[in-house]
Amino acid sequence: MAWALTTAEASFRDEVRDFLARELTPELRAAGRRSSGIFSDHEHGNRWHRILAGRGWSVPHWPEEHGGTGWSPMQHYIFSAELAAADAPPRAPMGPGMVAPVIIAFGTEAQKRAWLPGIRSGEDYWCQGYSEPQSGSDLASLQCKAVPDGDHYVINGTKIWTTHAQYANRMFCLVRTASGGKPQQGISFLCFDIPAPGITIRPIISISGDHELNQVFFDDVRVPADGLIGEENQGWAIAKYLLQHERGGAWAPMLRARLRRLQAAADAAFLAGDPQEADDMALRLAEAECAIDALEATELQSLRAQARGEPHGIRPSMGKVLGSELRQQLTELGVEIAAHYAAADLPLDDDLQAGELPIPEDAVFSMSAYLNDRAASIYAGSNEVQRNIVAAHLLAN
């Protein structure tokens, strides 16, 4: 960490480190280290979530009355940094970090009782139904319809890029419940169980070879009307609230952990190579470290603002642009360091978790991460759209 800790914060850091040393098994560390996507596979990520739940740390950001920890913003940042440094499997945020804040803010007491405990424990696994084939960055143009029918809605349409839908038992979904007027005015936010009659999930294999994404088809799917969050046709405000949580959070801890891996890989790769090439790469890695330091300073400023109760403003959009582009930059350096080894096509899956790879592990990881992270500047709202949000805010002031 590049910042000074108080005595209490250092004690908390040591408590987290002790917990990780005891509970984060070599298998889970390997899974986290070999996770080239946004987060780890369901098996390892959910297993780690359940371990954290046993300690009371699975949903630290939630209000304490719902199982949160009551930590300070700096404690949350320390926790993220220590998880990244220890190669803990990055967990899927759809339940704990995305739909849960919506349920807490807009849900009824019955909805909170029905859904929050399963998210906290890891019993339930959620996926997000937002994007459609013709509605990505322009999300308000979505056409997946939900028609009221007694105490149910009947859904027809499709959702795409639905991460981990093949594992999920619940979905939160934006649907069109009215037409006419501004498109944002006819959108509602529904939660329901999957799979269900009429739902078809088809895999989308990414260029990295990973099966994280899916297209989900709805054919006269009946879901209970009591899964409506908030009021009918008021889902757009809820969707924007959720996107702030999706774009928010700290990027620097993960980026710093990735940088340390690159520095170690570069030391090994250039050990007997051209000294000039080694110096050039060291300089580029140092420039990346400076950029991460700058991002971290920005995130720490945001933490202080959060502690003062200030609204998020454009900070999530700024962090999303800077963090995702730095993430892509690091993957490009990783491929250069791996050189010809990056061309090897070896799966970083369970068959290899227990054994050694025939070539450097970081070399195999580099190409998988590079290909996977091409989407980093698109997901959670494309960076072009985020720049427009930042510009509109600054020009208005």
Image: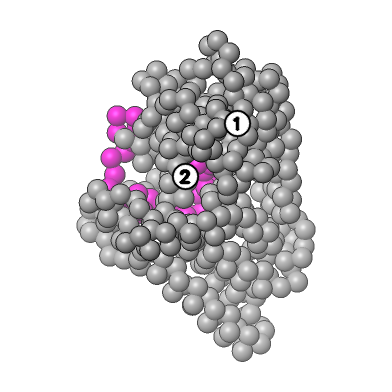
Q: Position of residue 25 (x, y in %)?
A: 52, 45
Q: From what the image shows, is residue 9 above or below residue 71? A: below
Please identify, in this view, whether the residue under mark 2 or under mark 1 is nearer the observer: 2
Q: Which colour scheme is used?
A: one colour
> Residue, x 50% and y 21% (percent of image)?
227
Is 147 displayed left or right of 323 in the figure? right
Query: Is residue 207 or residue 56 the one in the foreground?
Result: 207
Q: From what the image shows, is residue 165 above or below residue 351? A: above
Q: How far apart are marks 2 and 1 (CA)?
A: 20 Å
Q: Of helix, strand and loop, which one carries label 1?
A: loop
Q: Position of residue 363 (x, y in %)?
A: 68, 65
> Residue, x 31% and y 38% (percent of image)?
69
Residue under label 2? 243
Residue under label 1? 168
Using a 10 Å C-alpha cutoff, classify the residue at mark 2 as few (fewer than 14 neighbours), some (14 to 19) or many (20 or more): some
Mark before the other along the chain sequence, 2 or 1: 1
Q: From what the image shows, is residue 77 above or below residue 162? A: below
Q: Of helix, strand and loop, which one carries label 2?
A: helix
Please state which amino acid type lies under the numbered disc 2: Leu
Q: Position of residue 349 (x, y in %)?
A: 69, 47
Q: Is residue 347 visible?
A: no
Image quarter (top left, top right, bottom left or bottom right) of the N terminus: bottom left
For the magenta stretch, what is the residue range? 64-93
Using a 10 Å C-alpha cutoff, classify the residue at mark 1 as few (fewer than 14 neighbours), some (14 to 19) or many (20 or more): some
Q: Where is residue 235 in the image (x, y as percent from the top left)?
A: 47, 32
Please state which amino acid type lies under the numbered disc 1: Ala
- Occupied quadrant, residue 96: top left
Query: Is residue 170 or residue 130 the one in the foreground?
Result: 130
- Number of the label disc, if any, that sits on residue 378: none
> Residue, x 38% and y 50% (percent of image)?
79
